[in-house]
Image (cartoon, grey):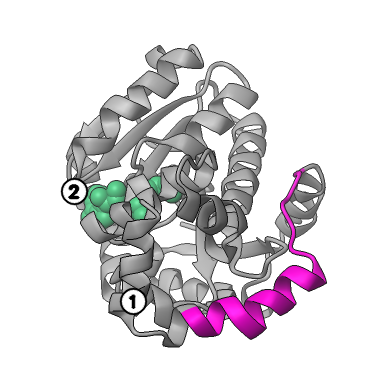
Amino acid sequence: MDSHASPDGLEPLLRAWAEDVDFERLTRGDRLVKALCINPFGNYAPPPLVRGLLRLGKSELAAANWADPGGWRSMVISYENRARQVADKALVSGGTIPTALRNRRRLAGQFLAGLIDRCPHPAPHVLCLGAGPGRIILDALSRARDDAHATLVDLNPDAFPYGKRLAAELGLSDRVRYICDDVRNVERLLDTPPDIVKMIGICEYLTDAQIRDILSTVTAVMRDGGHIVFNSISPAHGTDRFCRRVFGLHMTYRTPQELATVMSPTGLGDFASIREPLGVYHVCVGRKLR
Ligand SMILES: C[S@@+](CC[C@H](N)C(=O)[O-])C[C@H]1O[C@@H](n2cnc3c(N)ncnc32)[C@H](O)[C@@H]1O
């Protein structure tokens, strides 16, 4: 991220943390079959035909997207990768976006755990925006120092019972607080300022103005020097037409540099990012400058 490069050596730190991540990769053969057969079919076959095939194969991923395009349920299906239906075995295990989502989960969890461990204050507080069930912060909390805690905010409380069950299984129930609200209300929702803010899986569904609006509120309550973890998305997955026509999923593609430009006026800077191996997502880290 040339024009916004981190002067405090964040990029080498992220690189070192990323080296320990066990990523999923695509072979050259996988890429060729996708480019020549799967993607053209998904992108250009009549949508009613593709939807019919997905219904016939009882795809839970498709049903989750039809009910709530890009919602938390479709994320969880991709993260867990425990497909039961025939259609999902191919779509979830081998699909480029679901595979890249699992890489994003691992990379973001690793960065959050690293940032929590390096936090100079006792009892680091992580604020998760549009958290869904909190899969990624639960990964991080279970790996990092044990005095950290998190506040998870989402407009939609549907994901909370599942998240609370996961938290209980991991012995983290007393370290997470789920709040159903709009993230723009954080000022009145928090009792302690966040040291780290997590914004994974939302920017691609928001306009520039919405991102700035949310972050202006959030940076007002964050500790100075606190970090933010977010992601960019690139159309490198090659299935945008499929996503829009078959799933009703309209995502805004921005590079890490473009996101840094959107976020800079809110007082964030010193951005650095690492790309997961499929090239679909970068996981980015920035810092509150003032
Ligand atoms: C794609 S899901 C991502 C869930 C989770 N962060 C993950 O990566 O698995 C996006 C979530 O953001 C939530 N959301 C969107 N705008 C929001 C807002 N203004 N305030 C709170 N939650 C919001 C949605 O309800 C949804 O659960």
Can residue 63 be seen in the rendering of this structure? Answer: yes
In the image, is residue 11 above or below residue 221? below
In the image, is residue 286 above or below residue 247? above
Q: Residue placed at 41% from the left, 83% from the top?
A: 241
x, y (%) of residue 70? 34, 59
Query: In what element is the residue under mark 2?
Result: loop
Can residue 266 be seen in the rendering of this structure? Answer: no
Q: Which residue is mark 1?
A: 49
Q: Residue furthest front?
A: 56
In the image, is residue 212 above or below residue 59? below
Q: Tell me, yes or no, whether the highlighted magenta stretch contains residue 38.
A: yes
Mark 1 lies within 8 Å of ligand 1 (Cβ measured):
no
* Residue 182 numbered tag: 2
Examine the residues drawn in magenta and state their main secondary structure. Answer: helix
Q: How many marks?
A: 2
Residue type pointed to by label 2: Asp
Q: How far is mark 2 from mark 1, CA to CA?
A: 38 Å
x, y (%) of residue 202? 37, 59
x, y (%) of residue 151? 35, 32
x, y (%) of residue 243? 39, 73
Query: In what element is the residue under mark 1?
Result: helix
Span of residues in magenta: 21-41
Residue type pointed to by label 1: Leu
Mark 2 lies within 8 Å of ligand 1 (Cβ measured):
yes
Q: Residue placed at 55% from the left, 76% from the top?
A: 234
Q: Check disc 2: other Cα within 10 Å, few if <14, some if 14-19, many if 20+.
A: some
Q: Is residue 206 left or right of residue 10?
A: left
Q: Check disc 1: other Cα within 10 Å, few if <14, some if 14-19, many if 20+.
A: few
